[in-house]
Amino acid sequence: MSEARALLESGDIAGLIRHLRFNADGMELAEVARLMEGAAAVSGFDDMQEAAAAMAREQAPQQLYDFGYACIERGIPFLAVPALRRALEMLPDEPVLLMELVSALERENRHAEAVAALEPRVASLEPWPARYLLARNALFAGDLARAEHEAGLLPAPDDQDWRPAHDRLGRTIARARAARAVRPLDSTDLRGWHFALTGGLLVTISPYGFHDGMTGRFAYTSDSFATCRRSLDRLRLILDAAGRRPVSVGLLPDRSSRILGLAAARLFGLPAEPFAPGRPDVLVVAYDLNETEADGLWERAEGQVLFEHASCWTDPPPVSADVTGLLHQVVKSPWGERLRISPAGEAETVPPDDRPVEELADEIVRADPHEDDGADEGVPPDPDEALAAFVRAVGGHWLTGPRDAVRSPGPVPSSRFG
């Protein structure tokens, strides 16, 4: 019995999906379909079960398309790619198949492959969305020159629904040009590409595992009061370099954001008040935007700056912060439940710190921002002046447009876990 079949028969659907992610490209489509038919039956996904059963019987373009569509809808686009590629080989001039393949590749952050699929066919297709998608995917693949070229050939859309995408593409390319003038904007330039793609300024380049697959992002990190203080100090450096002077701190409702917001207010000598959308010149402070209420933050009020200390790069927040402290896959806050090694060398669970938010904010204010300093050998230095210089160089393109969510990590790769 194959490993995949054993996983299905044991009811381990999550394990089966993980197995298929790494092995499906080398399997027969009919076998993948039979496995997914069984998985869908266990999960109660009637649409997937029907599409998979049909593709198991026949791998014609319609069945391949229906299976690919169901995979995308069910959040497993990597399984859609082989089926849609096969369908496109059979019907190479069918734009519906091409657009669905590009959608699956985009959702998997396989932007260079999306460019390769679009490139030979784009001239024969309507520019919206084909050439727009070519320019967008070239940009997210790190090919700024190609993105600029395709965007230059892209007419303004007649359909009003495409206007926001047109404007967003223009802003992103403009930010990338500004970053390119002062940074390498290559496959290791996390700060440069983070700014280009999200419009936000990244405070911390992780010094751990930089040359071993992380490239400036954190995987699992146990946060500390010192790291929070360091983030706030560098936030102040960014505001000073950009000439921004908030008049108050906006407190978001979750506990972690209130702690960090109160610490920011005390460090910056500003009053703190509950966040109110539309209030101008406010520094809005979030610990993690996935853990709080983000309504009212997509559109930026005049002079408003949104700071997020710990941002999940594998599950990006619904809005992109103007300043981001660090990029993580998993973070444990300084006041949450934590694991630590006991004096006897055993792992033990430390319960949450239930002190009032004001006391925890004071802990951040008192913390030594350099307490956690330390880095792997060979990590590029990241002095304060380098960050300030970057802020000054790109400041004209900062705080422009809405805070769109960005799902892709872009052209700077980092290892994922789990």
Image (tube, helix red, strand yellow):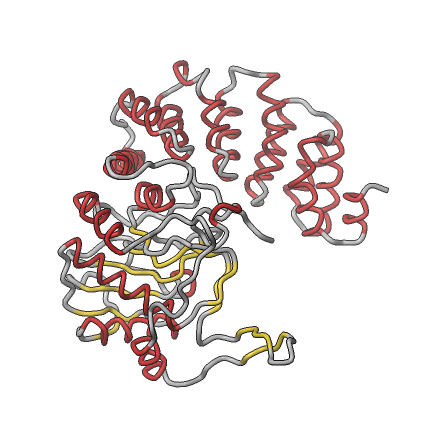
Q: Is residue 315 left or right of residue 27?
A: left
Please determine whether, in this image, residue 264 is positioned above or below residue 22. Answer: below
Furthest toward the front, the residue is 377
Please determine whether, in this image, residue 283 is positioned above or below residue 340. Answer: above
Give the residue drawn at x 81%, y 50%: 9
- Front residue of this view, candidates 144 and 388: 388
Give the residue drawn at x 43%, y 45%: 407
- Front residue of this view, candidates 390 and 33: 390
In the rendered image, residue 383, in percent from the top left (x then y), is placed at: 29, 54
Q: In this view, does 213 lie to the left or right of 366?
A: right
- Front residue of this view, candidates 180 and 19: 180
In the rendered image, residue 328, in percent from the top left (x then y), is placed at: 46, 56
- Front residue of this view, candidates 45 and 275: 275
In the rendered image, residue 80, in percent from the top left (x then y), is placed at: 60, 34
Quadrant (top left/top right/bottom left/bottom right) for the N terminus = top right
Give the residue drawn at x 23%, y 45%: 401
Please determine whether, in this image, residue 246 is positioned above or below residue 110. Answer: below
**Residue 229 picture quarter:** bottom left
Q: How many labels does the image show?
A: 0
In the rendered image, residue 48, in percent from the top left (x then y), is placed at: 65, 41
